């Protein structure tokens, strides 16, 4: 159902969605413009005249679009606003509960699932242990069960648009087919999107965990005023930056890149394999087959309780990324970061500060990403929601 450039397709069950709503109509560019303005206006709403002014559409076109949205239950009146002349203007708002999307994070040892309304707000969530190496049949069965119970437990006040699934790569984002997932080569060639879509009878989108999290941050909005680079206490933030790197440190390490406001996946959807850059030629072996990867070094440091060393290695790799891409911001996330956020922010920032000082430049800020441990799952839900509002990146 993704209609933007390079967007994801959907598997079997792609005709599902908001009950009687015409999803084909929702995919139109003009409808997306109107929906996005309704979404950002919040509960206060926005008038048809303002919608026309901000979108550049004619009042007649806006009236047709909003009439259809109201008929489908996606928009409703939010009162009236005084006019500069003539009768008061009717104000419209988005109805968040009119539809929902499920976001699923299949981590190496845990499954997290969230049910989000049209604004991206989480209305229900589930978390359970998972062994990604237990085999495709077992993992799919667990995912189907968790999604079913999540939707049932959330009361399904609005129909479900679909399911976004995020997991470690590499994978083919466009076809929803997994490649040799690091540490789990048995997944190579598995058509996860189509299998889940058939089982769930819903549209399904599959992406790397870090890309999903980066999309959620890009859609989420402005960076908080928060701490300066190198400060001890992290401030949770989304990202209003045009270009940023999201570095995820959980059971493994990966990266999501937003360049010029869009998620950068690469021609083969393989961009962001951050954890497998080699920083020590004679280092310990990594699950990817190389030696001295960032992931292997950081996991080894964490295993021996040396979080400061893990942060230093992560900072070294982040410095390489900043030097290559000149991003505006580095965001840190994942369970390992969440367990010691001050240590990781301080350690990564120290490396970036030192490199910037030598170059006579301002250091790139380091923050903790918004969303916490469920940030990837929330981003996975945005794989379905963002296209409705014209916000699908990549």
Image: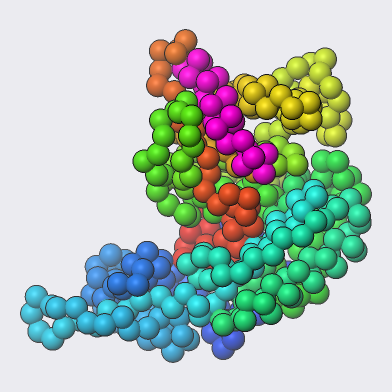
Residue 193 to residue 232: above or below = below
Res 104 → quadrant: bottom right
Camera sees residue 254: no
Q: Position of residue 228 (x, y in %)?
A: 41, 30
Res 11 → quadrant: bottom right
Q: Position of residue 191 (x, y in %)?
A: 82, 60
Is residue 203 shown left or right of residue 136? Answer: left
Residue 73 to residue 341: above or below = below
Res 267 → quadrant: top right
Residue drawn at x 50%, y 70% as measured from the top left: 118
Q: Find the residue positioned furthest to the left.
A: 85
Q: Find the residue positioned furthest to the top.
A: 358
Q: Where is residue 302 in the image (x, y as percent from the top left)?
A: 74, 30
Residue drawn at x 41%, y 44% as measured from the top left: 223
Is residue 51 shown left or right of residue 392? Answer: left
Q: For residue 209: magenta?
A: no
Applied colour scheme: rainbow
Which one is in front, 40 or 1? Answer: 40
Residue drawn at x 85%, y 57% as measured from the top left: 190
Q: Position of residue 76 (x, y in %)?
A: 37, 83
Locate the N terminus by quadrant.
bottom right
Residue drawn at x 49%, y 37% as measured from the top left: 234
Is residue 261 shown left or right of residue 176? Answer: left
- Magenta span: predominant SS is helix
Number of numbered markers: 0
Camera sees residue 51: yes
- Magenta range is 335-356
């Amino acid at each position: 159902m993704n209609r933007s450039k390079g967007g994801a397709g959907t598997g079997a069950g792609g005709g599902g969605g908001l009950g009687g709503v015409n999803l084909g109509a929702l995919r139109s560019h003009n409808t997306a413009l109107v929906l996005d303005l309704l979404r950002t206006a919040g509960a206060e709403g926005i008038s048809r005249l303002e919608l026309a002014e901000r979108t550049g559409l004619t009042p007649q076109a806006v009236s047709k679009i909003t009439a259809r949205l109201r008929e489908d239950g996606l928009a409703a009146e939010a009162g009236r606003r005084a006019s500069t002349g003539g009768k008061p203007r009717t104000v419209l708002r988005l109805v968040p509960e009119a539809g929902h999307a499920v976001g699923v994070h299949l981590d190496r040892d845990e499954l997290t699932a969230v049910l989000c309304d049209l604004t991206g707000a989480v209305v229900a969530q589930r978390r359970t242990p998972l062994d990604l190496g237990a085999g495709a049949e077992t993992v799919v069965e667990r995912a189907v069960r968790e999604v079913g119970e999540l939707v049932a437990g959330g009361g399904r006040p609005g129909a479900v648009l679909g399911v976004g699934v995020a997991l470690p790569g590499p994978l083919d984002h466009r076809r929803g087919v997994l490649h040799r997932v690091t540490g789990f080569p048995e997944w190579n060639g598995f058509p996860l999107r189509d299998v889940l879509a058939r089982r769930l009878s819903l549209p399904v989108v599959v992406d790397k965990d870090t890309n999903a999290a980066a999309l959620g941050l890009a859609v989420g909005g402005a960076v908080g005023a928060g701490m300066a680079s190198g400060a001890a206490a992290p401030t949770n933030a989304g990202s209003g930056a045009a270009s940023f790197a999201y570095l995820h440190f959980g059971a493994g390490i990966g990266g999501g890149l937003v360049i010029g406001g869009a998620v950068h996946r690469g021609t083969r959807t393989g961009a962001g394999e951050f954890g497998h850059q080699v920083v020590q030629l004679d280092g310990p072996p990594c699950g990817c087959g190389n030696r001295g990867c960032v992931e292997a070094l950081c996991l080894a440091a964490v295993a021996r309780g040396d979080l400061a060393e893990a942060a230093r290695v992560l900072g070294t790799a982040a410095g390489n990324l900043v030097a290559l891409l000149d991003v505006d911001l580095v965001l840190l996330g994942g369970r390992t970061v969440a367990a010691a956020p001050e240590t990781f922010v301080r350690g990564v920032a120290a490396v970036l500060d030192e490199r910037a000082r030598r170059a006579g430049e301002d250091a790139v800020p380091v923050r903790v990403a918004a969303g916490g441990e469920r940030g990837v799952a929330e981003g996975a839900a945005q794989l379905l929601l963002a296209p409705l509002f014209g916000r699908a990146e990549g």
